[in-house]
Amino acid sequence: MKIAILFGGSSYEHEISIVSSIAMKEVLKNQIIYIFCDQYRDFFEIPHKTITSKLFSSGEYKKCDKLTIGKNGFFKKSMLGQKLLELDVVLNLTHGGDGEDGVFASMFEFFNIPYIGPRVEACSVSSHKFLTKGYASSVDVKTIDYVFYTKGDKIEISTFPVIVKPVRLGSSIGVSIVKSQEELEYACDVAFEFDDAIIIEPFISGVKEYNLAGTKIKDEFHFSIIEEPQKVEFLDFDKKYLDFSRTSKALEADISKELQEKIQDAFKKLYNTLFEGSLIRCDFFVVENEVFINEINSIPGSMANYLFSDFNALLNSLAQNLPSKKPITINYEYVNKIHSCKGK
């Protein structure tokens, strides 16, 4: 099976997507075709053997074959005009904007291109933290208390510490822990540099954190191990950046069977039917043995390969069992009836 990895995009997480995609060379046994989308949204086919992060920072990628997108796939120039790039499925590995906000999902749907990744509706929910909170509550998964503000609102916080987050970004970009009123204005200014809306949550010191990845194939859930991530006060951008290149297997968290089942049950509720066709990672908080969703990563770093015993087999199985939309037949029956009536 030929898997095309689409990465880059017009996104604050553009560089992370590059690192995440290069890591796939070590974990996927398939023939990989790399398709890079630069900041101008031009597409390039990047040779598998020569792909390095420097290729992009230097601008050398522009010497690679340029691609266009059209019905059923990507095309490149040939002696006879345009040649369809041979691939079986596209793996959407574009973090942040374009990849996780639904732009590429819409493009794949429009051009009838099979892809692994969140569908448009799932992107809308998971890429916007405010909407994630509402969705989680609607499927009976607990969320941490929060307040929501848009740019220009008067922001009033009475209890500290809190954590300030832009609503549409991941990888801890624009996120700050605020311990006093004096720090609040600056933290909000930083967050508003990246987004026009923010959420503010209480910062819970010492909270237990657990990550679980998984997918659903033929109505059956396939879970990764549950990982307890590196425990520091706050996983900043630099620490998470390194996490996106992970390929070595993570250690399984030492938790009770009861807590494991609670976390898996919350994952099932969140995944539901909304995220079919994608492999996601959910990051949970556990407070007094109660499970709270922190974030839904619809395109996790390095596809969370390090949490699975056989990631390659799982991804291939998912690729062969993607959801499909029922074709719509348009026969102009209504229009013809109108014309028929007018003719009487």
Image (cartoon, rainbow, N blue to C red):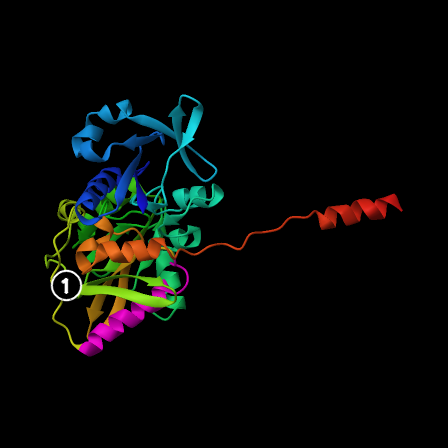
Closer-to-camera residue (167/276): 276
Q: Which residue is mark 1?
A: 228
Q: Residue at x 72, y 50 (%)?
A: 333
Residue 117 shown in magenta: no
Q: Residue at x 25, y 70 (%)?
A: 263
Vertical relation: 291 (above or below) 240: below
Res. 201 image quadrant: bottom left
Please state the total of marks drawn on the protein image.
Answer: 1
Judged by its main secondary structure, the magenta piece is helix
Res. 23 image quadrant: top left
Indicate the position of residue 228 as horizontal and vertical percent values: 14, 63
Q: Under tag 1, what secondary structure?
A: loop
Q: Which residues are magenta?
A: 257-276
In this orientation, does residue 133 appear?
yes
Residue 274 shown in magenta: yes
Q: Residues within 10 Å of mark 1 (few under 14, many from 20)?
A: some
Res. 57 image quadrant: top left
Judged from this view, the residue extending furthest toward the bottom is 258
Closer-to-camera residue (1/154): 1
Q: Residue at x 14, y 59 (%)?
A: 229
Closer-to-camera residue (337/132): 337
Q: Amino acid at mark 1?
A: Glu
Indicate the position of residue 82 as horizontal and vertical percent values: 43, 27
Closer-to-camera residue (5/57): 5
Judged from this view, the residue extending furthest toward the right is 344
In this orientation, does residue 12 appear?
no
Q: Residue at x 20, y 69 (%)?
A: 286
Indicate the position of residue 198 as horizontal and vertical percent values: 32, 50
Indicate the position of residue 344 as horizontal and vertical percent values: 89, 47
